[in-house]
Structures are given as structure tokens and as C-alpha cells.
Image (cartoon, rainbow, N blue to C red):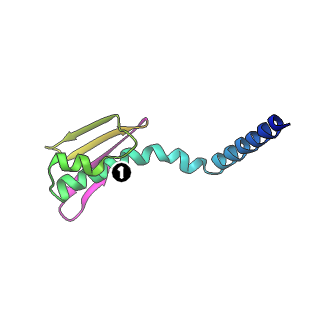
Amino acid sequence: MKRKVFFTLMLALLVALFAWGWRERVALGAFPDIISAYTAKEYCSCRYVMQQPAEYCRGYVKQSVPINDFFESPEAKRITVSGLGRSNSARWVGERQGCRLEP
């Protein structure tokens, strides 16, 4: 009897989790892009707007979700970050505009 109640509760939990995931599918699908975009934009702002050293900015943008690739092009003032299968770049535009994500 206890086993049947346990399996029923687990099935109900699984169905509820699936329903929540389906309802939030758009937000869950956007999550991988957020990691690389945030890291690229914030690192670019830290380096080229606030003019902080690279070591400081690496710590500033460090997250619990790891990134795969990180490339900084100082001459182009461009940062490219890859993580969770997505890649995003940010470039310093100017003093008044700061950094922008590239499409």
C-alpha cells in the first residue's frame, strides 16, 4: 500500500513538473543565450567603460554556470563568449554609447 501511494505521488510530481516546463518553455529556451550574452556585455563594460584590469573583470562576470570559450580582442575592443551551446559578442562602441551586444 505504501508503495502504491509513493508511486502515485511521484507520478503526480512528474506530471506537475512537465506542465510547468511546458508553460515556461519560451523562458527556458532563452536561458542558454542569457549566460553568454550577460558575460560578454558585462565584461566589455568592465574592461572598456570602467577601464578595469582583465583579472578583475574575469572575477566580476564569473557565474556558477560555466562558459566554454572566452575570447577578447583588445585591438577591436570585442568580447566573444560561448556557453551552453550559444555564442554572443559585445563590442565597445564609444565613450557615450558604452558596449553593445552584436546581433
- Per the rendered image, the range of residues in magenta is 85-103
Q: Position of residue 18 (x, y in %)?
A: 68, 43
Q: Residue at x 15, y 44 (%)?
A: 74
Q: Residue at x 71, y 44 (%)?
A: 13
In which quadrant of the rendered view does residue 12 lie? top right
Against 84, residue 28 (above or below) is below
Q: Position of residue 46 (x, y in %)?
A: 22, 55
Which of 81/60 is in front?
Answer: 60
Against 9, residue 94 (above or below) is below
In which quadrant of the rendered view does residue 6 lie? top right
Left or right relative to 86: residue 79: left
Q: Which residue ends up furthest to the front in the rendered image?
A: 2
Q: Residues within 10 Å of mark 1 (few under 14, many from 20)?
A: some
Against 10, residue 49 (above or below) is below
Task: Identify the element where label 1 is drawn.
Answer: helix
Which of 24/16 is in front?
Answer: 16
From the image, tell me which residue sits under label 1.
38
Q: Is residue 91 magenta?
A: yes
SS majority, magenta: strand
Q: Which residue ends up furthest to the bottom in the rendered image?
A: 96
> Count of labels shown?
1
Q: Position of residue 94 (x, y in %)?
A: 19, 59
Left or right relative to 56: residue 26: right
Q: Quadrant of the N terminus?
A: top right
Amino acid type assigned to the residue bearing label 1 in the image: Tyr
Left or right relative to 3: residue 96: left
Q: Residue at x 54, y 51 (%)?
A: 27
Which of 38/55 is in front?
Answer: 55
Q: Position of residue 48 (x, y in %)?
A: 18, 54
Q: Residue at x 61, y 51 (%)?
A: 24
Q: Is residue 51 magenta?
A: no
